[in-house]
Structure formats: C-alpha cells, structure tokens
Amino acid sequence: MKAHASVIVASLFALVLLTACGGGGASTTINVSLIDFQFSPNTFTVPAGKEITINVINNGAVVHDFVIMKHGTTVGESYDDEDLPNVYWKIEVQPGKRTSATFTAPSEPGEYQVVCGTKGHFQSGMIAKLTVVAQ
C-alpha cells in the first residue's frame, strides 16, 4: 500500500508542476518578475475580453512598469510622452515590492507589445509580448 500511495503523491506533484507551468495555453493569471532590463517570463497568453489578474514582483533596483500597448501600436525608438495615447494598460512597481492588480484583456486577438516605461529600459531591451487569443 505504501508504494501505491507514493505513486499517487508523485503523480499529484507532477500534475501540480504541469499546471503551474501553464502548459502554454491562455491563462487569466499573469505572474511576472521585473528585473533590471527584463521581464521574466517575457511572453504571456491571455483569453480575449476576460478579467486578468497580474501578480508582479520588482526584483530590480529601480522602479519598473508593465505597460501594455494598444493593438497594432509599438514604441518607437524610446518610450516617451508620445506613446501615452497608445497605452492599453499600465502598472508601476517600486523596487523590492510586489503587487497584484486586475485588468480586462483586450477583446481583439493578436500580439501586443509590453514594455517598461522607465527611462532607458525599453532601449535596454525590457520588452515582452502579450498574446490575446479568442475564446
């Protein structure tokens, strides 16, 4: 009976790990770490028009943003005031802090650029991709 219980526990553990990895499908939760000049992970897939919970931790030494640009728009050479009308949604996180928020995913499926709005971070490669899929 002990061997059978061990197999069940191991199977449940594997299932939890696979679920935690997301399996590559659309999720209503985004977990992201902001580290100086990168998002980890840097790709996200969410269902169109659904409420999304984002859990963000800033492991960097300066303020970071998670800025989703509107569909069909991207930042030019640098993120600045000219980009503000093209922002779909944004959250700012202070260094060493974590926060959670919710937003409604865009209703139009497609790829959306995600950037950090802190000066110089976009140019340093702090870019990610949000993929919105139809449900």
Image (cartoon, helix red, strand yellow):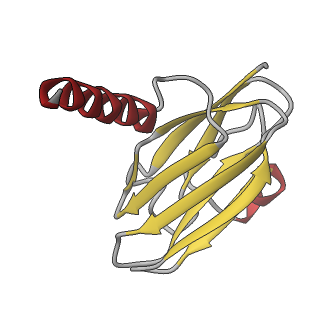
For the C terminus, give its image quadrant.
top right
Q: In which quadrant is the N terminus drawn?
A: top left
Residue visible at 78% across and 41% down in the picture: 105
Identified at 50% across, 80% down, the residue is 94
Question: Quarter of the image holding residue 45?
Answer: top right
Please identify the quarter of the rendering in which residue 132 is found: top right
Residue at screen point 35% across, 62% down: 35
The foreground one among 5 and 13 is 5
Asked if one can make out residue 126 in the rendered structure from this viewpoint, the answer is: yes
Q: Would you place residue 76 above or below residue 33 in this image?
A: above
Viewer can see residue 76: no
> Which residue is outermost to the left?
3
Residue 90, how many percent across, how many down?
70, 61
In the rendered view, does 18 fall on the left or right side of 113?
A: left
Image quadrant where residue 5 sits? top left
Q: Residue at x 34, y 64 (%)?
A: 36
Looking at the image, the residue that sits furthest to the top is 134
Residue 42, image x, y percentages: 44, 41
Q: Is residue 135 left or right of residue 4?
A: right
Q: Is residue 32 above or below residue 70?
A: below
Taking 28 as reference, is 86 above or below it? Answer: below
Report x, y in % for residue 76: 62, 45
- The one nearer the camera, 11 or 107, is 11
Compared to 73, does 24 lie above or below?
above
Nearer the observer, 133 or 1: 1
Image location (x, y in percent) of residue 107: 86, 32
